[in-house]
Image (cartoon, rainbow, N blue to C red):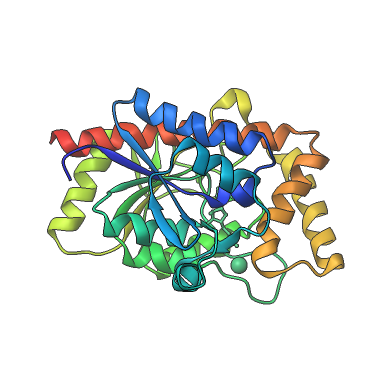
Amino acid sequence: MSKAYVALESTVIAHGLPWPVNFKTALAMEEVVKREGAVPKTIGIINGNIKIGMTKDELKYLATTENVMKVGTAEIPVATAMKNNAATTVSATLRLSAREGIEVFATGGIGGVHRDVSWDVSQDIIELSKTDMVVVSAGVKSILDVEKTLEFLETFQVTVIGYQTDSFPLFHCRYSKYPLNITVETPEDIAAIFKEKRKLGIEGAILVANPIPEEYEVPYDELIKYVEMAVSEAKAKGVSGKGLTPFLLGRLSELSDGKTLEANVALLKNNASLAGKIAKALKKA
Ligand code: PSU
Ligand code: MN
C-alpha cells in the first residue's frame, strides 16, 4: 500500500459511546488522522458488506441503528453470511484491516481480562498475537483486571511499548502501578521496531500504550471508586459477555458525571493523532 493508512474501529461508535458523542467522535478521529497527513479507514459491516472506510452516512447509520452486532474475529462470518449490521471490535478490525495491507490502527483501549468474574478474556489479545499491526491504545481499560491482562499479553507474545511513559497507562488516567519494560520517545522508533519485527518474521501486533492527555485524565483514586461500583453492579445484575464492557463504560460515565466520557473522547483523538504519525513514519523510512 502506498498511502499512510490508519484503521479505526466501529464498536466504540456503536457500543462504546452514546449518541451523538459517538458520531461526532468518529468524524473527529478521521479528521485528526487526516491532519497528520494519513488516510483514515473506519472498519465496519453494513448489511453483511465489509466496509474498509465508511462514508459519513454509513458512520451515522452505525451510530444510530439498533441491533448492530458487536463482532470479534470469530463472529465476522456470521455477520456477513446473515447480512447483518455489525460493529468491529479490536480483534475484528485488526483481522479485516490487515487483509487490506493496513499497518496502523487506533483504538481507545483493548479488551483484556475482566475483573471479578470467573472467566472473561477478550478475543482482542489472541488476535494481537497473530496479526501484524501497530495498535495505538491508551492502555488497558480501567474496568479490567490490569495485572492479569498484562500477563496475558506477555503469555501471548504481544510486544507492548510505552509511548513517552514507563508506567502502563490506565485508559482514563495516565499512570498505574504497573511498570512497562519498554519505552520509546518517537513515532519513528515505533516504525523501526515494527519493520524489524516484520523482517524477522515475528508475527503479531505491537501494542503502543499512549497515555491520555493530562488535562483530561480522571484521578486514579476517583476512577477506581467508580470502577468498583460499576463492577459490583454488573455482577448483581448478571451482566456478562459482550454487554459487559458497554455496561461498565456507560455506568462509569454516569457515576463520574460525564468525566470518563470526556476522557474517552480525548484519548481516542490522541491515539488517532499518534497513529497518523506512525503511519507516516512507516512510509518514510
Ligand atoms: N475503546 C474504547 N471504547 C470501546 C472499545 C475500545 O474507547 O468500547 C471496544 C473495542 O472494540 C474492544 C472492545 O475490542 O471494546 C472490548 O470488548 P470486550 O471487552 O467485550 O472484548
Ligand atoms: Mn468478553
Q: Quadrant of ligand 1?
A: bottom right
Q: Give the quarter of the image for residue 192.
A: top left
Coordinates of residue 57 in the picture (x, y in percent):
51, 38
Residue 27 horizontal/vertical position (percent):
50, 32
Point out residue 240 in the picture as x, y percentages from the top left corner. Answer: 72, 69
Residue furthest bottom as drawn: 118
- 258 left or right of 154 in image: right
Identify the residue shown where x is 67% and y is 34%: 20
Image quarter of the C terminus: top left
Q: Is residue 97 above or below residue 226?
A: below
| Image point (60%, 23%), residue name | 215
Nearest to the observer: residue 77 or residue 208? 77
Quarter of the image where one finds residue 223: top right
68 or 73, nearer to the observer: 68
Say which of 19 and 133 sits in front: 19
Please give the count of numbered marks on the rendered protein.
Answer: 0
